Image: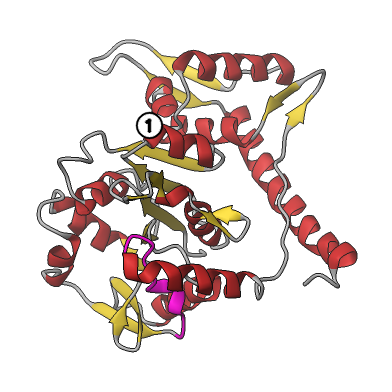
Amino acid sequence: MPTSYCAVVSAAQIGLRHNFMKPLLALNGSTVVKNAIEALRAMNCKPLIVVSGRNSADLIRHLGRKNLVHIVNRDFNRTNSFYSACLGFAEVPKDIDQVFFLPAEVPLMNKDSLVMLAQHMQEHPELDILRPTRGGKIGHPLLMKRAAVDYLLNCGGEGTMREALAAYPGRMGLLELDDEGMQLDVDVEEDFQCFLAYAQAQAQQQPLNCRADIILGRDKPFFNSLLATLLRQIELTGSLSTACAKANISYSNGWKSIKSAEIQLGFELLESSRGGSSGGVSRLTANARELLRRYDSLEEQISRLCSDSLLDYFADTN
């Protein structure tokens, strides 16, 4: 089976620049944090977990909820970045093979670097953790197997991640990459101007791409990527209320969206059992699982069509 990837992006402790959130700083027609998200999406990381703290509502609004799981560290002022990272690690599904971890302040790694990290990990199955380097200096992101994620979770966010990694009993490896962007830190003042200059130079080298959001509807839209994400969370958690919280949707809006889709589709999406100490469990129906399978397949096919058609219309722009 192909390796499954997930990503955790931590933006809870990232600072401000001139009273403006650094993750939202403009960067090559996008923003600092969106640049990191798009690079990880290119690796088909699902789910993609974003941990926020300072001004979390602004960050969630900016990123939206499409194929994202938002976690808020409400104690960001009293905890450190390792604690925030662990909040994200706790949301990694058990069936995920490997996890990219990226602080949002280091968003300029090349997408090719992610591919090389993944390939190196495949070629060296003895490794649990792989860290990129350039000129002997460690950069980001880290790529970790499930065992390493569980180890970091057991540390409970105590101390720093650097200390936890130094004490890790398993095998760690380093991969030298010629990628300056994986070391430039938007949260370090002396790096910032170099960061902007490097980002501009890199943007002009990147090929044009396009994406499509798939929306199903009859007389009106009733199913999109946000509802697909909510259903996946219900299947993982067994609870509509918990799934809504993880997808940052109010319970009433989540319930209404599901009921509206059921009317348009002509079948139920959830089956629930009542009672017990947990108050009951919600699961996807067989029809709902099949709907998700077809939706994902359609999304992949249209993404390929978008990429192929892009060359027909914008070949001279790449």
Disc 1 marks a residue whose amino acid type is Thr
Q: 272 or 7: nearer the eye?
A: 7
* Residue found at x 29% / y 76%: 127
Quarter of the rendering containing residue 248? top left
Residue 140 visible, this angle: no
- Judge whether 158 appears above or below 91 on screen: below
Residue displayed at 37% across by 44% down: 19
**Residue 180 x %, y %:** 44, 79
Q: Is residue 108 left or right of residue 266?
A: left
The residue lying toward the viewer, choosing from 68 and 20, is 20
Q: Badge 1 local density, few (<14 within 10 Å), some, or many (20+)?
A: some
Q: Position of residue 155 (x, y in %)?
A: 13, 54
Q: Is residue 193 magenta?
A: no
| Region in magenta | 178-188
Residue linked to disc 1: 237
Q: Which residue is situated farthest in the front direction here?
A: 18
Q: Is residue 275 left or right of residue 295?
A: left
**Horizontal arrangement in the rendering, residue 44 relative to residue 128 (left or right):** right
**Colour convention:** secondary structure
Q: Where residue 295 appears, x then y in whole percent?
A: 68, 40
Mainly helix, strand or loop, the magenta region? loop
- Residue at the location (40% across, 20% down)? 241
